[in-house]
Image: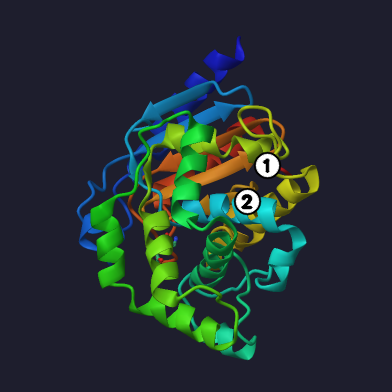
Amino acid sequence: MKQADDYQELLGRIAADVAPLIGSGTPAEYIPALASVDPRRFGMAIADLDGTVYGVGDWRLPFSAQSITKVFALALALSLDGDALWERVGREPSGNPFNSLVQLEYENGIPRNPFINAGALVVTDRLQTLTGDASSDLLEFLRAESGNPDLAFDQEVADSEGENGDRNAALAHFMASYGNIANPVPILLDHYFWQCSIRASCADLALAARFLARHGLRADGSRLLSRSEAKQVNAVMMTCGTYDAAGEFAYRVGLPGKSGVGGGIVAVVPGRCTLCVWSPGLDRRGNSVAGVAALDRFTTLTGLSVF
Ligand code: DON
């Protein structure tokens, strides 16, 4: 059987296997635009290294990428800043919820990792300093790698994030008090909220993440990250990409992965393919219930985990 048929058949089987879970969990409720999404949505896409995409369900429907964008922001910042970035943000799992404040004071304003909100704010701050327009730079990158020029910010979501953004503002101001934020906090927060608001489909995000499976090579063959940096980003996704559930995610899925409260999860099989799954119902740690189950089925059925 050709690989295309394999992937298509596999996706059909995974969708059938997780069907009883679709609709369980709770969509993110902290902003109206996320709370109103149909909880019964489910889509999944697999992108080959050469850019062929296979999908099932709502795999072409755009959703709010939210924290999935943190992977792309990290990759861009690392490509421009190199190891200097790691002086401002760590790379250890936090064991705390994604928006937690508690470790920051003990650790002198240096966030544990780039995927909790505090760490992502530092990365966006650095990207803003290096590019002058962090969120537009990120959007352009996602458009280029997905081949979809229609990817866009969702102004309603971005505005709503701002109106409900006290905790992110607190994180940013607190880190600024330690000298770990260089840009004015209101400007940083705008870029961070725009970044989180980007709408993209499973197909778009699986395609855009391919540089992580291609050891740092972009869609056009140019190099974004060194092989070693691509390994580093994948490693941080594995250990920190699903927050205080990263151990469980590694146990069940065994792949580098990054979730968002929009219900999406991107995962990487280095040297082989990328995946994106979306279903809005979240577990109590903010990860898609059906999404984690679908990735669990993928690695169980194919043996394609990194272990
Ligand atoms: O900053 C926030 O809290 C949200 N805009 C993004 C959070 C998110 O997606 C965390 N992921 N699970």
* Colouring method of the image: rainbow
In the displayed structure image, the side of residue 161 where residue 138 appears, left or right: right
**Residue 193 placed where, x, y %?**
38, 62
User: Is 189 or 284 nearer to us in this picture?
Assistant: 189
Tell me which amino acid carries mark 1. Answer: Leu
Quadrant location, the N terminus: top right
The structure residue drawn at horizontal position 53% and vertical position 37%, both measured from the top left corner, is 208
What residue is pinned by disc 1? 224
**Residue 292 placed where, x, y %?**
48, 48
Work out whether 252 lies above or below 186. above
Residue 111 sits in which quadrant? bottom right
Work out whether 227 lies above or below 96. above
Q: CA distance from mark 2 to mark 1?
A: 8 Å
Residue that protrudes farthest toward the front in the picture: 132
Quadrant hosting ligand 1: bottom left
Tell me which amino acid carries mark 2. Answer: Ala
What residue is pinned by disc 2? 75
